[in-house]
Image: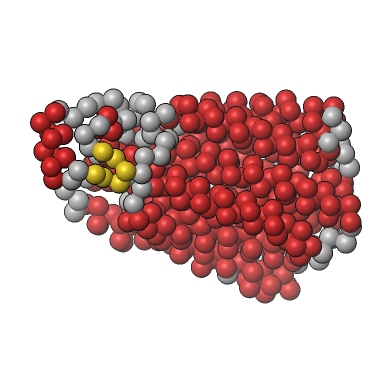
């Protein structure tokens, strides 16, 4: 399987080449969510509520999965940068083994505890509770395959290959869109049909990834150095003399090791905890927003959807920077690391400024694309105007996050994010007393501003001086 060397060539071209497919994948995912919601929405508000109630626990699964995805991606990128194909294979297989364990445990957890989880939400509607559990039960095996699909995409991205995941994601989303109306309406399976369509799409994607990866995405617990296990990802073989020498020194080498699994967990745990905390804080903020009525709840959701278009670009840069910095860190190319960070920050800032201008100048027009009620449009517009001031700082946060992740220090951005995300709730509670609902919007915006500034300062004061010393 072809790898892309990010330690050579023009920096801006490498970053754009990496980022564009990641942005495309995000755009496809956004389109999928929009279309999926539209299909289920035609069944009525109860069906939408059923899917929405299950989504929190599905999102929680993805947050836990970050434990494996982030750590594996970082270690694979470092190994590619060092040109060590043995480590690439080892960290890939160790990550897959850990991913399988996490997927099985979480799948069983949802199947066994699904009714209790839905009951915890106190929905007060037996129909919604029943459909929510059915959707969650079918989503449990779906998550098992989705966990692997996310991991495979991250591993390929760490080798510089972001185009293949884009194509596979596109195929999966098209499959889901085709199956949705057939299973939901044609067979009359309703909400359950939507869950089954998503399951089948993810199974298809899993097959595509395993066929694409072949030798890379396969388990090999004990490697015998006298056998054909010596071939690397790119098909190169070791000479017989070297094979015999290595065999005499180390006759057997395990690809899946306890040490590699521990390294992956240590790298991924901060990000996973950060995402779990982020979900909990958002739920608490949603409860606070609900005090201002249905218009406020709708405005927050619409605002987040509009804002997610910006996150597609900054999120794509985050993944691109992590892979780019990871390889160059492994190759000890300190100058390219600095230039990569500066280039990505420039690209992200320009896009963020343009987005902020649109949010400030045309908020009502953007809101009216989703709803027609005047009150909801006005509240959504107020959200967009406040959030506009944090867009540049969001770009700073995401690019800096990618940099620290790439050098194997995800704890730095995770710690910063957790601190200021946790502060959102107390800040909102104080500001809402004098500013009303806009106090909540400003709490969200201010926390993003503080995260961006803090990570940029940490890069300038800690990371930049350190990488200059890399030789």
The residue that appears at 53% across and 38% down in the rendered structure is 149
Residue 58's place in the image compared with 165, above or below, is below
Left or right: residue 312 versus residue 336 is right
Camera-side residue of 464 and 186: 186
Give the residue drawn at x 34%, y 51%: 257
Quadrant where the N terminus sits is top left
Q: Nearer the viewer, residue 56 or 235?
A: 235
| Residue 288 point in image, percent of width and height | 74, 66
Decide if residue 236 is on the left or right side of residue 377. left
Q: Position of residue 286 (x, y in %)?
A: 73, 61
Residue 185 visible, this angle: yes
Q: How many marks?
A: 0
Q: Nearer the viewer, residue 283 or 237?
A: 237
At x 61%, y 45%, the residue is: 143
- The answer to whether residue 87 is left or right of residue 195 is left
Q: Nearer the viewer, residue 394 or 158?
A: 158
Residue 344: where, in percent of width, then height?
A: 40, 41
Residue 203 higher or lower than 397, as above or below: above
Q: Is residue 441 above or below residue 376?
A: below
Percent of width and height locating residue 110: 67, 54
Classify residue 307 by image quadrant.
Answer: top right
Q: Determine the residue positioned at 82% across, 48% down.
A: 131
Is any part of residue 394 visible from this angle?
Answer: no
User: Quadrant location of residue 125?
Assistant: bottom right
């Amino acid at each position: 399987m072809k790898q892309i060397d990010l330690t050579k060539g023009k920096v801006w071209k490498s970053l754009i080449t990496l980022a564009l497919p990641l942005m495309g994948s995000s755009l496809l995912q956004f389109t999928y969510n929009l279309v999926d919601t539209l299909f289920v929405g035609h069944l009525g508000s109860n069906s939408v509520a059923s899917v929405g109630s299950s989504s929190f626990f599905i999102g929680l699964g993805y947050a836990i999965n970050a434990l494996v995805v982030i750590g594996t991606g970082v270690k694979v990128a470092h190994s590619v940068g060092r040109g060590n194909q043995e480590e690439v294979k080892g960290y890939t297989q160790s990550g897959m083994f850990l991913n399988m364990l996490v997927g099985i445990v979480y799948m069983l957890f949802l199947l066994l505890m699904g009714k209790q989880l839905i009951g915890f939400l106190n929905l007060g509607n037996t129909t919604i509770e029943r459909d929510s559990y059915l959707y969650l039960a079918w989503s449990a095996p779906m998550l098992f395959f989705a966990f692997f699909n996310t991991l495979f995409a991250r591993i390929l991205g760490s080798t510089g290959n972001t185009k293949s995941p884009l194509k596979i994601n596109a195929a999966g989303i098209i499959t889901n869109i085709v199956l949705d109306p057939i299973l939901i309406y044609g067979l009359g399976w309703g909400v359950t049909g939507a869950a089954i369509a998503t399951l089948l799409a993810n199974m298809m994607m899993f097959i595509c990834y395993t066929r694409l990866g072949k030798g890379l995405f396969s388990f090999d617990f004990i490697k015998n150095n006298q056998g054909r296990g010596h071939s690397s990802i790119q098909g190169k073989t070791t000479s017989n003399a070297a094979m015999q020498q290595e065999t005499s020194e180390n006759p057997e080498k395990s690809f899946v090791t306890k040490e590699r699994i521990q390294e992956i967990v240590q790298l991924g745990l901060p990000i996973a905890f950060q995402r779990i905390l982020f979900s909990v804080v958002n739920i608490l903020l949603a409860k606070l927003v609900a005090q201002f009525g249905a218009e406020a709840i709708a405005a927050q959701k619409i605002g987040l959807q509009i804002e997610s278009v910006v996150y597609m670009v900054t999120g794509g840069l985050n993944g691109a920077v992590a892979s780019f910095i990871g390889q160059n860190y492994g190759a000890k190319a300190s100058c390219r690391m600095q230039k990569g960070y500066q280039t990505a920050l420039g690209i992200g800032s320009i896009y963020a400024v343009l987005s902020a201008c649109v949010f400030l100048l045309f908020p009502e027009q953007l809101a009216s694309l989703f709803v027609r009620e005047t009150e909801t449009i006005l509240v959504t517009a107020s959200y967009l105007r406040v959030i506009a001031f944090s867009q540049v700082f969001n770009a700073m946060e995401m690019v800096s996050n990618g940099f620290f992740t790439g050098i194997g220090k995800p704890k730095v951005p995770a710690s910063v994010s957790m601190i200021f995300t946790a502060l959102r709730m107390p800040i909102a509670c104080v500001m809402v007393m004098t500013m009303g609902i806009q106090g909540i919007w400003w709490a969200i915006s201010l926390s993003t501003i503080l995260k961006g500034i803090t990570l940029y300062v940490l890069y300038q004061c800690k990371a930049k001086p350190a990488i200059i010393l890399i030789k």
